[in-house]
Amino acid sequence: MTRYVADHLRLPDDQASAVRQHYWQRYGATLLGLVRHHGVDPGDFLSKTHPGPELPEFVRRVQGERRRLEQLRGERWLLTNAPQHYACHVLELIGLKHMFARIITIETMRLCGRLCPKPSALIMRHVIKCSGRAPSQIIFVDDHSENLRTAHRIGIQTARIWASPTASARARHSGRPLSIRRPSYVQLQVNSLALLVRHQHRLSRK
């Protein structure tokens, strides 16, 4: 992704990395900043910044994850800012593609003619409407603070996996250690899927 920003904006790698991080923090997705401020084509960005044939080198299957997902109550939906080809490929590699009743990827997050990926409240409200459920009947699991904050504001129950590999990597790269304190917009905080399963009863079933 940094390479893409560097090539398209003609920046050195360190400046490109700063731009990528800035747009991710400001908009929740680097792509939004590139589209809004630099006219980048979303399809071109998504196809060139997500690995294809080489993806198996970076993905590993975790034993027991399928069983743990099956133990989560309710219907499971996946809401991801990744493109469809990438998300489905990852799920196939880890053996979890058929564990979700619905997979919503960034290409389908268009409302009113514009792209609205997480943490957009518009897309979350749209997902609620599609589910046919009240916000309080939905549990949103994520590791991104802005995504969780938005979900909480519109009445969705929230669970944070605060020490996931993604969150840990971001913390290492930023030089800021992860905060263990549970923020007010998170009802349940765990550091693994196994603990989410074990403590899911703590989230009210309304």
Image: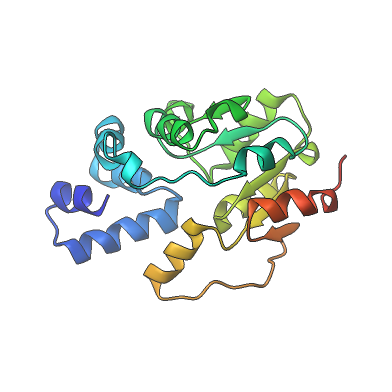
Q: Residue furthest front?
A: 63
186 vs 4: above or below: below
Residue at x 52%, y 43% (from the top left corner) = 118
The foreground one among 145 and 62 is: 62
Rendered image quadrant of residue 15: bottom left
| Left or right side of 111 for 65 | right
Q: Residue at x 52, y 33 (%)?
A: 95
Q: How many marks?
A: 0
123 lies above or below 147: above
- Counting from the top left corner in percent of width and height, residue 89 is at 40, 31
Q: Nearer the viewer, residue 28 or 59?
A: 59
Query: Between residues 119 and 61, which one lies in front from this camera angle?
Result: 61
Hey, which quadrant is residue 44 in on the image?
A: top left
* Image colouring: rainbow
Q: Is residue 59 left or right of residue 196?
A: left
Q: Is residue 35 above or below residue 186?
A: above
Q: Position of residue 86 (x, y in %)?
A: 38, 34
The spot of residue 40 in percent (x, y) is: 24, 38
Tell whether 136 sits left or right of 122: right
Residue at 43% x, 26% y: name it.
113
State the quadrant of the C terminus. Answer: top right
Q: State the image coordinates of residue 76 (x, y, percent, origin top left).
A: 67, 32
